Each structure stands twice: as C-alpha cells, then as structure tokens.
Amino acid sequence: MNIFNIFDTLQKIDGDAIGRLEHASRRTFMNRIGSTLAAAAVPTAFATVVNKAYAATPTALEVLNYALTLEYLENEFYEIGNNTANLIPAQYKAVFSQIGIHERNHVKFLVTALGANAVKKPTFDFTAKGAFPAFTDFPTFVTLSKAFEDTGVRAYKGQAGNLISEPLLLQYALQIHSVEARHASIARKILSKISGDKSIKSWITNDAGFPGDVYKGETSEGQVVQGGLNLPGIAGLENISFATITESFDEPLTMAEVLKIAGPFVVSL
Amino acid sequence: MKKTLSENSVSTDNEMLVKVNRRYFLRSAGVAAATGAYILGACTDHDLESDQIVELGSGDVGILNYAYALEQLEAAFYTQVLASPFIGITEEEKMILTDIRDHEIVHRQFFKAALGSAAIKGLTPNFTSIDFSNRASVLGAAKLFEDTGVQAYNGAGKFIKDAGYLLLAGKIVSVEARHAAAIRDLLMPDTAFFAGDDIVTTSDGFDVALPPVVILPSVQPFVMNRIGYSQLPV
C-alpha cells in the first residue's frame, strides 16, 4: 500500500491544472506580499513552476501532494480531537484550536493550489486498530499531536531540496514548515507538563521520543555532524553538551520514513 | 571597552591596525575574505565600528554570513539575559532561556566554522533599548528576535543555490520557530499566542517570509556595526 499515491497523480497532469496551480499560487502570493520587490520576482518563479511541471519528473506536484497527505492527516486528527467532548481540558483548548485552524488552512491552500491534481483524503484510523486511545485519553492525544507535528517538521525539511528550483513553492513550504515547528514546540511543552517528564522539552533532545521512528531514521535527530563539521569538536562549543548540540538542529525524514510512520494510521486511500 | 559578539574574538585594541585595515577594506570592498581576519576582534575606546561597513558578501556565502550575523545577535542577547537575569525569573524560564542561549551559540559557532575565512567579523551588539532587569522587555525582545529569525530564514531559503546549505538553513529555522513558540507561551501561557494571528496568517496558516532587504534594516538598531548587504540576492 502506498498512501502517498502520487505517481498516479503525476500521470494526470494537464495544462489546465498547471494553469490553476499557477493562478492559485499567484493570487495567494500577491495577497500576502504586496511589495513591489516581491511582485517583481513572480514571473520568473512561475515560469519555473510551469516548465518544471511539463518536464518528465514534476517534482513540485509530487512534493505538494505528499505535503497535502500529511496535512489531511493532521487536520482530521485535530478536527476530531477538538470536537470530542471531555478530551481536551479547558486550559489547553485554545492551543489545540489554533493548531486545528492552521492545519485546516494548510489543507485548503494545498487543495486549491493543486486543483484537479490534488490527491484525495485517505481514510484514517488514529487508534491504529485500537493501539492508541487517541480521543479518549488526553495524554495519548498530546503524544500523537507531538509525534505528528515533529514528523511534519521533518517531512517538510526533507523535501526542501526537491523544491530548490521552484523558489516560490520552496518559500511556501518553508512558511508551513516553521508553523509546524511552532505547533511541535507547544505540543511538546504540554506533554512535558501533563506527564511531569522534564526531559521532554520544546526542542528534540538526542533521538529521544515516542514513537521512535519519528526521531530516528537515516538522518537521526541525534546526529551532531552538520555540513561536514563534527560540532562537538569546533571552537567555542567546549562548554556545550552533546545533547544541546542535537537540540540545535532538526533533521529531515525521507518520504519512505514518513510513510512508515504514517502507515499505521491509514486505513485506505 | 566593548565586548564583541563572538566569544572567540581576541581584542587587539590596536587602533592603528584597525585604521590600516579599514583603508584596505574600503579599497577592496566586495572581497569578503579580505575583510575578515584583521578587523576581527578589533576593539577600541573610540567607536570606529559605527562607520565601518561589515559587508555580508554575495551568493550563498552572503546568505550564510547573513544567518551568521543574526545568530551572533541572538547569542549575544541570550548571553546577556543569563548574565543579568530579569527580576523574578523562574526556574522554568531560566531553563528555557539557557537552552535557547546554548542553541544560538551552537548556531553561531557553526556558521563561523563553516564560513572559515569568508566569515564576517564578530559584531558588536547594541542592546541599549532593552531593559535586562525587566521581564516584559527581555521576553518581548526575545520574541522579536525569534520571530525575526524565522521570517529571515523563511525568506532567504529561495536565494540559496546549494541544496546542502538549504537543508542546513531548514534544520536551523525550525529550531528558531520552536524557540519563538516557547517564548510566546511564556508571555501568554496556554493561549493561541504561541503561533498567534499576529504572526501566522490566519487565511492560510503561513508563517511570514521576509527578504534580507527588509530584515536587515529592522535589526540594524541592535548592532553597532553597519551591516552592508548590497551584494545579497534580492
């Protein structure tokens, strides 16, 4: 089962769809950034989008549908959670409501941008066949929230390089990426508070955390080599712990790794 | 004598050397590598820094120096915050701010090492507008620095040509966003403020992305040195 059924989608590409993508993206872009400077950069950016989309491997669409699938998952998770009575204590309702609003709007943005090329929402089961009391136990809900947000951060990060020749789409992805990181930060803080586990901080320490796959992988959250530099050995970090160095950088996940994490929560496409 | 932002810079206090190098700098403006070594750590009682332009350079090196400058500013800020904690600081606040300080130092030292001879010098901060004894002033400034960091990295990504550098920027920006949310939650606990409507666009759930030409003038008041960015991509 491939929950990111993107290759089928790629074969359905037509000129109209690309036009819609261009139009939707431009409209949103122009609304958000009014400066002449930004506007001046638009034509080149969209030329790139169009050219790329007509090429043999339209990576941008692949990436956007991958992102959309993750956003579908997050959005439905919060939609159910926020509407389940007696799940979220009053103290934390405002936080999860805000996260829910963002995820809903991420879905809306991607669906609009992709138009006919948008993948359909899969059917989810957040209990993973009964393994998790996702909507009956608040600590479980927060644990899943934290896991989904940290996965989202790592998933978007893993795709940045695939958008390097699409400046505008890259920027959009980054703008969503950092919001996922804000979500992750607060979900981790709440989990730390309600569990009393002070080792859980707003940032990821080493490769610690549940489920393990969210924090490990090909490029583990515990790694300390950045840009070819072994950071514990460089000047000025003599008094900084290994764990702190791991906290200072978030790491990417590959599509395959994300698929493995999300798989148990997907019933069907 | 002023402290420079860089922990490792050695204060030479040699005005003549500074003057000589300043002349050299002006003659060879645009050669980033030439400006770094001798001016680094220069520090005199005369405020020569105010009329020395620290040129970030062009291309990916320019963007990395841009990030290095911002990380220098953040690291210096939190170092000062922990050196003179605000009145009534809690244990939790101290832990969070200490972690953030250390992360920013890691970022700063990473960029310094990665840039090598192309790195700009250690900048001299100007935090006179911040009351370090006052919680609201300190956390307000922290919020500004973290949100600005997020917006800066988000806006700079598309200018980076090398996929490896782009990934590195991505690895750092999400940590800045984690900081921003944590600081914001200290200011208004258990509210939507961690990713508030003042900073995340409600219609699409996007963080802001701003180009260097917008970010740099906004942080200039916090730096004594004039930062030159005419060669950065726009």
Image (spheres, coloured by chain):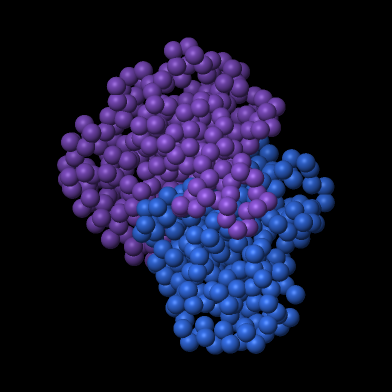
Chain colours: A purple, B blue
Horizontally, residue A75 falls left or right of residue B109, namely: left
In-front residue for pair B136/A254: A254
Q: Position of residue A188 (x, y in %)?
A: 60, 33
Up/down of A118 relative to B152, above or below = above
Up/down of B100 relative to A44, above or below = above
Residue at 29% over, 32% down = A119
Horizontally, residue B141 falls left or right of residue B227, namely: right
Q: Position of residue B120 (x, y in %)?
A: 54, 70
In-front residue for pair B136/A24: B136
Residue at 42% over, 55% down = B165
Residue at 36% over, 18% down = A267
Q: Position of residue B17 (x, y in %)?
A: 62, 84
Q: Quadrant of the C terminus of chain B?
A: bottom left
Q: Position of residue B122 (x, y in %)?
A: 61, 68
Outermost residue on the right side: it is B87
Q: Quadrant of residue A235?
A: bottom right
In-front residue for pair B136/B22: B22
Residue at 58% over, 77% down = B38
**Number of callouts:** 0
Q: Quadrant of residue B218?
A: bottom right
